[in-house]
Image (spheres, rainbow, N blue to C red):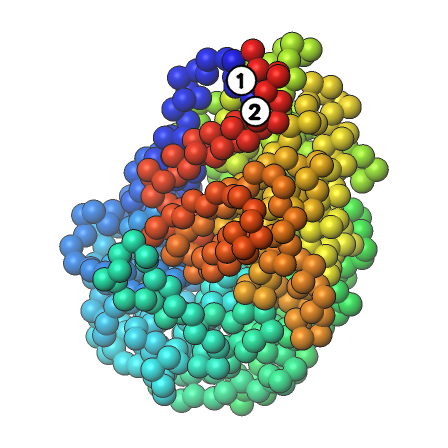
Amino acid sequence: MAASSAPCVSSAVSAFPRRLARTRRFALGVPRQFGVSPDGERVLFVRTGGGTDPVSLLWSYDTGPDGGERLLADPRRLAGGGTVPAAERARRERVRERSEGVVGYAADRELRVAVFALGGALWAVRTDGGAPFPVTAAGPVTDPRPSPDGRLIAYVTGGALHVVGLDGTGDRPLAVPEEPEVTYGLSDHVSAESIGRLRGHWWAPDGDALLVARTDPRAVAVRYLTDPSDPSRKPRALRYPAAGTANAEVTLHLVTVGGRRTEVDWDRAAFEYVVDARWDAHGPMVTVQSRDQRTVRTLAVDPVTGATRPLDERRDPAWVQLVPGTPARTASGVSVRVVERDDTRGLRIGEALSPSGLQVHEVLGVDGERVLFTACEEPTECHLWAYDPADGFLRISAEPGTHHGAIGGPTTVLASVTPDGGSVTVLRDGDPAGRIGSLAEDPGLTVAPRQLRLGEHALRAALYLPSWYEPGARKLPVLLDPYAGAGAQQVVRARAWWACVSQWFAEHGFAVLVTDGRGTPGRGPAWEKAIRGDRFGPVLQDQFDALREAARHCPDLDLGRVAMRGWSFSGALAAAAVLHHPDVVHAAIAGAAPTDRRLYDTHWEERFLGHPDEEPENYARNSLLGHAHKLRRPLLLIHGLADDNVAPAHMLRFSAELLAAGRPHRVLPLPGAGHVPTDEAVTEHLLRFQLDFLREALDELAPELAD
């Protein structure tokens, strides 16, 4: 038996790749996108019909004594619709949407009317009963949103912002693009992909006007995406702002339903990013950011003149971290804003400050004077918190895990993922009042990693060992399986899909180590910003420190056979590991890896590395190009050929450089796949392909250990 081979694996382990693919990483059947009515009587949500059903449906959960779940809209029963518009396809790619059907909805203030787009057609449904009904629109619909009173629906078609009555009458354009590529009411690529602003229009509370984003991408360089497996298919043009190049020009406009339009005035030369916008009872409010990301300013907007005045400003010598949902205001106008120290990122609500040591992740909503947010005291857990003036700051979730939620009146939705799986609890006045069912499939694996704190940095790590492992019986090759990048944690006390994948590799004979080091969230601004100018150095150092410390904890880890795998940032990290540290990492898999930092987008890359014209050395040091000649170990490159986020050029240029340097490597192109492959066959067999590559690469290092 080969050194990295496992005893005969169970049928559940053998079936896991297929199950992962069919469930789309166990996302199908999971309730999500919760909205709670102001009276707390209704909870709207989206959920597919089962753990392998890819079609999302719209549901309501009624919180009264005779309540429960009600199906509001099943797209398979609705006629009409056609091809999903390009703008909607782009939006789904940005959020990595894995289902079809009703993948999103918007509702009026009281949650009496919900609207959604289905195959470009506009649909509405009354949540108190009755069948969904079509609403006539001027063309294929993207991002429909009803006015707060439910009388009108705003939507985008052909780049123009329209409004139409709920009864389908009175359709009219409010803002029409002056040029073919200009759009009103939509987000741009960078705002959606890297900033997190997915919206482009916001209703006034009285329903008589909207705040609308105008996007002019004509200064942005054009890229062309094609499918080499289908030479008859025309390339798709994509405006993509690479680091150091021009961004789309984004302006904001106040547009009344009667057609009057006023431009919002701010210093766009100094603040070119629109990172957030909203319109509450106190008026419009926008948050803008400088190109170098060191200053973020929040502005109050005069709803008549478009003039602005500053409400808040944050500065940081590295970059100002954007916290979703902030800044915000309570019903009485109390400000909700972020405050930073080196070791904590807290929340100030009026004069109240969140507890010391609490790291705030996101503000989820404001209901009256109550504020709902997520935060952690221990980085391996993320809890749901609430603040109100009477009780102060209170933690709602109790179990170890990651928790999310929504709020409305006396009702709070608590969505949890714990080591045992996912659940959704509906709370009334703080007490459990019911559950919203999850239809997700069980992964079929027992996932129980050893949670470790390693080294001088107390690195949070998870060590996955085979279920059949007996200490001292044999040496285990090691697979480093982190993400380790900004914006994501993988070492959490929750049965997430990536934990299941790590356990699957462990069942095939590996000791799998996942470490969240410097640059990952949850441990304060200084921890996150330690990677400024060097995205590989500190991160790899933490991975290697964790590896050595884990081997002291578990002496059966074979440090003579260590591999690393990753996707996107961690794909580049894995490739950097075998290039620069072949004495530590002996084989690597790099999926969708950004190999040339100058090819990735402005906001994301310049945050960490600065402007390439001002700090070119950072881009040279943090790119894989220019270092191909150093390869001495097995390397597998995987890339989707339809990836509009990390372009296939990253992989192709790096592969060409490796070949020119005479460095053998393997390339696995994925025709038709985007940044995250969704095809079931590809997803299933991609895991098995990686397993075979790792076995072959590591077994060649120590053939004398084979049985």
- Residue type pointed to by label 2: Asp
Please say if the residues under marks 2 and 1 sit with CB atoms less than 8 Å apart.
yes
Residue 553 as seen in the image, left or right of residue 101:
right
Q: Is 182 in front, or is 400?
A: 182
Residue 481 falls in image quadrant: top right
Q: Position of residue 371 (x, y in %)?
A: 62, 55
Residue 675 visible in the snapshot: yes
Q: Position of residue 340 (x, y in %)?
A: 77, 59
Which residue position holds label 1?
2
Q: Secondary structure at mark 2?
A: helix
Q: Residue at x 51, y 80 (%)?
A: 249
Which residue position holds label 2?
699
Q: Is 499 in front, or is 536?
A: 536
Residue 338 as seen in the image, left or right of residue 446:
right
- Residue type pointed to by label 1: Ala
Q: Residue at x 47, y 60 (%)?
A: 649
Q: Is 411 in front, or is 14?
A: 14
Location of residue 323 with respect to 53 vertically, above or below: below
The answer to which of marks 2 and 1 sits earlier in the sequence is: 1
Q: Secondary structure at mark 1?
A: loop
